[in-house]
Image (cartoon, rainbow, N blue to C red):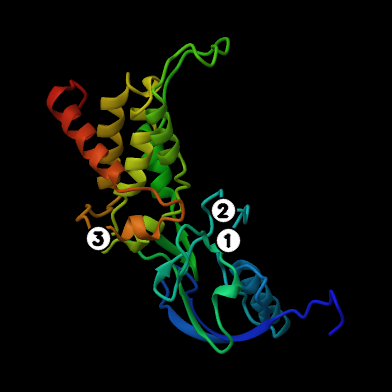
């Protein structure tokens, strides 16, 4: 090989993919070969290659969620070899690269499983239940007008950093898929913490936490039992410290608030 010449490393895999043609249909694992996969590909690019071959062979392609493919939107998500978003910590499925796998590996791919996440097709689930929790209270109500100076509302740096850490949550649902109780408390706690730590979020703090927790229960998510799988599998590494803050906010709101 001449100087500067790059030999691309390619691998062959066996995929066992969950196929289900709708929420009321019976699903099963189907086996597909993934041949000549570049280790520089992302996991979703590998899925694209497999789907192209399925289409050429006259078969229905595998349905999976994706959008920005930059680890920002929270759309992508599947359980890979038993772990939401795959084997790497702090990584979304679209950021997972095939260099994490070896030639000859068998890769099992299935959807996020939760009563609150109704399956649509194959690896695609309906995560609108998370959106309904946000609609219940994950916002602030402020009067519009001129933009205030950046230093008009003093915020301690520690609080600002903690709020930004919580705000990293992209609502992908990996915490729900990882939790043995299918709890959404890491997600809800991140959204509550993001606003509860800032002065702009305090006026509606009690109403927010009561409304969001009520909606979480209404959507049939389970409760937290402090297993910490959510924290381990979160692609944005949201801390369960936020769940403790959520519990405190909820108890304070229940005892001292007039909100129903």
Name the residue: 56% across, 48% down. Answer: 72
Label 3: which secondary element: loop
> Relative to the observer, which residue lies in front, 2 or 35?
2
Foreground label between 3 and 2:
2
CA–CA distance between discs 2 and 1?
6 Å
> Which numbered tag is attached to residue 181?
3
Give the total of numbered labels.
Answer: 3
**Up-down relation of residue 179 to residue 200 (above or below):** below
Q: Which residue is mark 2?
A: 71
Element type where label 1 sits in the image = helix
Q: Quadrant of residue 194?
A: top left
Mark 2 is surrounded, within 10 Å at the Cα level, by few (under 14), some (14 to 19) or many (20 or more) other residues, namely many
Mark 1 to mark 3 CA distance (whole Å):
27 Å
- Front-most of 121 and 185? 185
**Closer-to-camera residue (36/77):** 36
Residue 29: tell me if it is visible: yes
Residue 95 is labelled as 1
User: Left or right: 131 with respect to 247?
Assistant: right
Q: Report whether 245 appears left or right of 192.
A: left
């Amino acid at each position: 090989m001449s100087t500067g010449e790059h030999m691309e490393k390619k691998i062959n895999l066996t995929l066992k993919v969950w196929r289900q043609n709708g929420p009321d249909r019976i699903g099963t694992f189907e086996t597909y070969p993934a041949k000549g996969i570049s280790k520089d590909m992302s996991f979703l690019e590998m899925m694209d290659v497999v789907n192209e071959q399925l289409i050429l062979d006259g078969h229905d392609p595998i349905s999976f969620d994706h959008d920005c493919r930059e680890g920002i939107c929270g759309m992508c998500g599947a359980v890979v070899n038993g772990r939401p978003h795959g084997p790497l910590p702090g990584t979304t499925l679209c950021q997972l690269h095939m260099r994490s796998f070896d030639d000859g590996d068998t890769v099992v791919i299935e959807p996020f499983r939760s009563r609150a996440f109704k399956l649509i097709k194959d690896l695609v689930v309906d995560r609108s239940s998370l959106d309904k929790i946000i609609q219940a209270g994950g916002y602030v109500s402020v009067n519009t007008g001129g933009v205030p100076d950046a230093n008009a509302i003093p915020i301690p740096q520690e609080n600002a950093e903690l709020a930004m850490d919580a705000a990293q949550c992209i609502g992908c649902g990996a915490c729900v898929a990882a939790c043995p109780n299918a709890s959404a408390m890491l997600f809800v706690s991140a959204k509550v913490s993001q606003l509860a730590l800032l002065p702009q979020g305090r006026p509606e703090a009690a109403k927010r936490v009561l409304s969001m927790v009520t909606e979480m229960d209404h959507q049939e998510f389970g409760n937290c039992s402090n297993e910490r799988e959510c924290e381990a599998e979160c692609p944005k590494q949201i801390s369960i410290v936020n769940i403790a803050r959520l519990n405190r906010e909820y108890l304070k709101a229940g005892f001292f608030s007039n909100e129903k």
